[in-house]
Amino acid sequence: MAEDAGVAKVVRQLDRACRDAGFFYVIGHGISEDLINKVREITREFFKLPYEEKLKIKMTPAAGYRGYQRIGENVTKGIPDIHEAIDCYKELKQGEYGDTGKVMEGPNQWPENPQEFKELMEEYIKLCIDLSRKILRGISLALGGSPYEFEGKMAGDPFWVMRLIGYPGAPFTNGKPENDIGCGAHTDYGLLTLVNQDDDKTALQVRNLSGDWISAVPIPGSFVCNIGDMLKILTNGVYESTLHRVINNSPQYRVCVAFFYETNFDAVVEPLDICKQKYPAGREGTQVFKKAVYGEHLVSKVQTNFAM
């Protein structure tokens, strides 16, 4: 794989993007633009439903934090976010991960209306899993390892999260939009995120190395991909999980579907051997990052993310 000239070129691009920005666009990925658009449109149809209808799949701790949350229920650093969402997770078998996993147990809550919602999303999820795995194989090569550094015990049975998000149009005062913080500045806590955003509204912003906020202008048919906290740990800090936020200053409703590809739920995440050898931190060669158990990290985040 690494000897293919086309692969080698993409690997170099991936390496540069992950070092310099932590964000990049993915095109030529094999997921049809038609499906990408359908996923956003059926999500938009759901959010247009009466509030009472949406509450039929209301998210609660008893439901494993799966389902619908109203505007302001998701909290970033103590501040309510101006969006509504449906949260879905890989379904865990009862007792599979002991007390830690128990918090996340339960089936995903899919709405009956619009029809075919569940079927479309499950098809999309499978394709996002395959694409994420391919991107991580490229990142493995970029780090100087085999293509499979992130499989096996680390992410051979990856957990995943999907958030279907709706951002209301920004209010206007004296003919000018007020910036609405759809989602406050944060990093993602897994390996990779694939963002499927509306083509005609620019709202996602990424903070660059200089500390400036740069808009991730939509490119039709593409995904915006960013790396998360677990990948930062695995690379010993060589790749950065970048701060990003959503500022919706459009008067129009905006839809975004974010797919988060994670490690195994019970993975003990620490710098990979290839990263400790190739990029030792400091003259002593000691690792910068301590171990983190992904499932514990996720549960602690989920339990503090919602004003319920």
Image: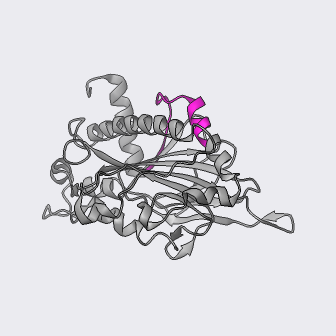
Is residue 276 left or right of 233 when viewed as pictured? left
The verdict on residue 176 being magenta is no
**Which is nearer the eye, 289 or 101?**
101
Of the pair 214 and 296, the residue shown nearer to us: 296
24 w.r.t. 10: above or below: below
Answer whether residue 28 is magenta in the image: yes
Observer-nearest residue: 210 or 161? 161
- Asked whether, in this view, residue 115 is left or right of residue 290, the answer is right
| Vertical order, 68 against 25 (above or below) | below
Residue 14 vertical placement versus 294 (above, below): above
Q: Position of residue 90 (x, y in %)?
A: 37, 49
Q: Can see residue 21?
A: no
- Count of numbered badges drawn on the protein: 0
Q: Quadrant of residue 286?
A: bottom left
Which span is picked out in magenta? 22-40
Name the residue: 36% across, 60% down. Answer: 104
